[in-house]
Amino acid sequence: MNFYHMTSFVLFPFLLIACSKEPRVPNIPDPEPPKPKEYTFTAAPSWADEFDYDGLPDETKWGYDIGAGGWGNNELQYYTEKRLENAKVGDGVLTLTAIREDYEESDYTSARLVSRGKADFRYGRFEVRAKVPPGVGTWPAVWMLPTDWEYGGWPASGEIDILEHVGYDQDVVHISVHTEAYNHVIGTQKTATKRIENATTDFHLYRVDWTPAYIRGYVDDVQIFSFTNEGGGFRVWPFDKGFHWLINIAVGGNWGGQQGVDEAAFPASMEVDYVRVYDLVEN
């Protein structure tokens, strides 16, 4: 055996071992969480809708999500566009109304306003003064979704719920966030609830303070919710991108319809006195 063949024979097992190893995964540590810090916000809002006009919602501030199909939750409504029966402004309030009617092969109509592309935000104080509807099967919400979904589809890019309510649990309101690591599908959602005896008859102030370090939720200026940036990357904290407002009433669905839908509860309306955004102050 000449040297060439002997060298090949000796090296061959080592080549097999080297080729059989798994590819090396880069060791990229998760980012460090922000250092503990308290944030403040501007005294005056930088963006708001006071609903001090009449007619359809201001088209410079609001668009519409339109259609049926369940919206990922087996909901029953068809969301309409620029239809006063479902979304109108008057007497100083925005009124969204879910109606029992046959419409585009759906049994209910409603409205889902969105500020996407018209008013998008990253960090700030977000306030809504609202009164939710009674009635089993109603599911109103004021919330925020990512505008560009840069980390992927729901829940990877996040969700912030400023106010959520289901009619079968009439006096309980919810503030929540959803991420890839923390969401209701896998039973890890981060949420807080508060019982309000007159949630469906009086206006209440719902608020979220969103900063690089934390998201905190308040009802009538009393804190009920806190979620901290753990520094674990987008799977736990995707809240470093632009988000936009949504205001809607869903009918039925996986949560809102858990105890059925009472047709006698419709039409059902949510009233909104105002929505306001205050800028984060970089101390």
Image (cartoon, rainbow, N blue to C red):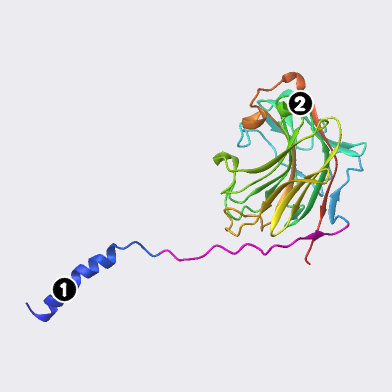
- How many numbered markers are drawn? 2
Q: Residue at x 72, y 24 (%)?
A: 136
- Asked where in the image residue 76 lies, by quadrant, the reply is top right
In this rendered view, identify the residue nearer to me: 171 or 159: 171
Magenta stretch: residue 38 in it?
A: yes
Residue 215 visible in image? yes
In this rendered view, identify the residue nearer to me: 200 or 12: 200
**Residue at the farthest left position:** 1
Which SS class for mark 1? helix
Q: Main secondary structure of the magenta part?
A: loop
Label 2 crowd bin: few (<14), some (14–19), many (20+), radius 10 Å:
many
Q: Which residue bears the numbered disc 2?
A: 99
Q: Quadrant of the N terminus?
A: bottom left
Query: Residue 272, image x and y in percent?
Result: 84, 39
Q: On the picture, is 123 further left or further right than 29?
A: right
Magenta stretch: residue 72 in it?
A: no
Q: Is 55 located above or below residue 244 in the figure?
A: above
- Asked where in the image residue 190 lies, by quadrant, the reply is top right
In this rendered view, identify the residue nearer to me: 171 or 95: 171
Q: Which residue bears the numbered disc 1?
A: 10
Q: On the picture, is 54 further left or further right than 261?
A: right
Magenta region:
25-43
Q: Residue at x 59, y 53 (%)?
A: 236
Amino acid marked by disc 2: Ile
Disc 2 and disc 1: Cα gap in Å? 81 Å
Q: Residue at x 88, y 56 (%)?
A: 44
Q: Earlier in the sequence, mark 2 or mark 1?
A: 1
Q: Is 22 located above or below residue 49 in the figure?
A: below
Which SS class for mark 2? strand
Query: Residue 165, image x and y in percent?
Result: 73, 34
**Residue at the farthest top position:** 264
